[in-house]
Amino acid sequence: MKVVTGVVGNDIHVVANRLIELSLNARGYEVFNLGVNTYLEEFFDAAVETGADVLMISSLNGEAEGWSREVKLLKAKYKNLDDIIMMIGGNLVVGTGNAEDIVPRYKNYGFDIVCHQVDLNTGLDMLETLLKERSIQSKETKESNK
Amino acid sequence: MSDLDVEQSNEKLLIDVGSTYFKLSRTGHIEQHLRDFNKDILDDLMYKCGKTVEGFAKDDVYICSSANGGLTTLIIGITNTFSLKYATNIAFNSGINIIDTVLYQNIEDYSLPSDLIDVVIIVGGINSHGNIFSANLYNYLAQLRYSNIVFVGNEIDVPAIKENIENIDILPNIIDDRLHIVEEHLREYLTNLYQKDIEGKEDIKHLYDITSNQIFPTPYIVNKTLPLINAKFSVVNPFILLDIGGATTDIHYSKDLVDDNLVTENEYDRLVFKKLGVYKSKQSLIFAAKNNEFVYELLMHLKVTENIFEEQSEKSTKILMQLAIFLVLCKISHYRKAYINLKLLAINSIVLTGGITKVLTSDEIEDIISFFYKKILNSEHNPMTVLDSNYDIWTLGTVNTDVDADTYISTKEERGK
């Protein structure tokens, strides 16, 4: 399972980025870490070049929201990314905010999994749950097509 | 005595054949001549400086040339940030001037170039990701006219690519498994093609009558020189080097000036503005100038009107060169980003080489640079201007390219086997 990850925008939180990479590796994912200060287009392009299954964006300075508003628009320009799992985590607002408001907002921006101030392992468990669900759905679809 | 002085005491004759001028350099002496386009290059050269050339053995004559016009290149890649960008970067650094790109997912929307393309480059995917290319690529290529075609993408697609595209050259992927660039194979391939192109051009082929050394692309030589630049100039990194020629303008820049996902071993990269020159590309330079809203203010600053574009005088050449500096800086700034956006406020030196150093004074160049920084970047930043009036950059590169020449020649021989 391939995951493209990185820190979006003008955000240099490199330690968190490295921890995400290590944790993903430990769980057996093939990780493509774009590092800090990554533009949205680079995430999508990396997913195309690697054939990634998951695009995992992190943000700590809250800048993600500005970028995330562009996600649907930009993703629509790509012809082969419909099935990719979009995940975002970290501190997703400038100042304070609660998850009940933030999570639906980001889902509306086009993310499948949103982890606002959730610890890393819990976030990765959420990813695994979604991957299992998708796998079951995919099998069911194949069988119904037979 | 420095190593460089020793090199030059061997009395080598260095010749650069440009699109407009040719230049000759020997110890302590530089000469420059406007080319006569009605004559074969060698005949013209021998007519104007035959005595000089005849005074040197073939082994001591070193020639570089950009007079073949460069190779036309079409790159088909799957993303802008990785495959297209990496291949474009390698092509520029190999001395290629004319590059068009096609984003594969939209390949059906692109119109077909009518001219014959020298080389088509296909790239995309890391080696563990395949089945990217399919019938729409083959259909597109079937309608295209090209002389060479090379695949530098993922390994999985190689068998299908070989089966469907005749005479395709296959090289290792230029994108590694960490999404980093791998330059060497494609770079070598393109420089060898450039070499073959030079040998195939009747005009340039005859130059081998006066040299037994390899004829290199001029931009390749300049790029090789940059790490050695401090041997001749007090240049403070990071810097850019502008080579404003008759047909094109080359920029070589320190990698520190770009925020980029390109991690290479090169300290310097090159890019080309193919229709920005003061002689062959004069009309397109004027067109670009007229479309830049700051140019009229610049003309006022220089105390001329746009009628200067119609004139054929020394004054008009000077103004065109000043405009070229301004337009090039605009094209690499956030204001008119063309291919890349350089951190212009971080530049410590701007080095100028080529014919411009014979036409403009330091003051005239600094005037334009400070106008650009004030008007476009709203800054008082004032990088140091260095003029390569004696073409030291080119001569330094030519005499220090012997090692590369050996590699170049052996590669050619291997290819010939």
Image: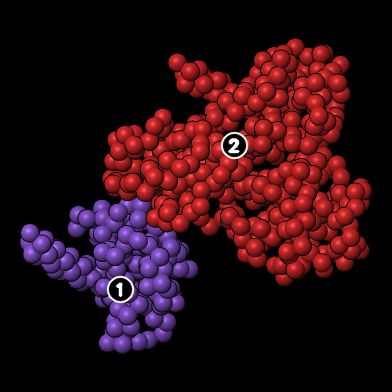
The answer to which quarter of the image holds residue A73 is: bottom left
**What amino acid is found at the position of numbered circle 1 in the picture?**
Phe
Q: In x, y percent, where is residue A114?
A: 28, 75
Q: In x, y percent, where is residue B133?
A: 34, 46
Q: Which mark is residue A111?
A: 1
For the residue pair B188 and B382, the one nearer the viewer reads as B188
Contact (CB < 8 A) between labels 2 and 1?
no
Q: Residue at x 26, y 73 (%)?
A: A112
Disc 1: which chain?
Answer: A
In the image, residue B415 sits, relative to residue B125, either above or below, namely: above
For the residue pair B328 and B289, the one nearer the viewer reads as B289
In the image, residue B390 sits, relative to residue A22, either above or below, namely: above
| Chain A, hue in figure | purple
Where does label 2 land, which residue?
B71
In the rendered image, is residue B39 in sight? Answer: yes
Q: In x, y percent, where is residue B363?
A: 87, 54
In the rendered image, is residue B227 in sight? Answer: no
| Chain B, hue in figure | red
The answer to which quarter of the image holds residue A93 is: bottom left
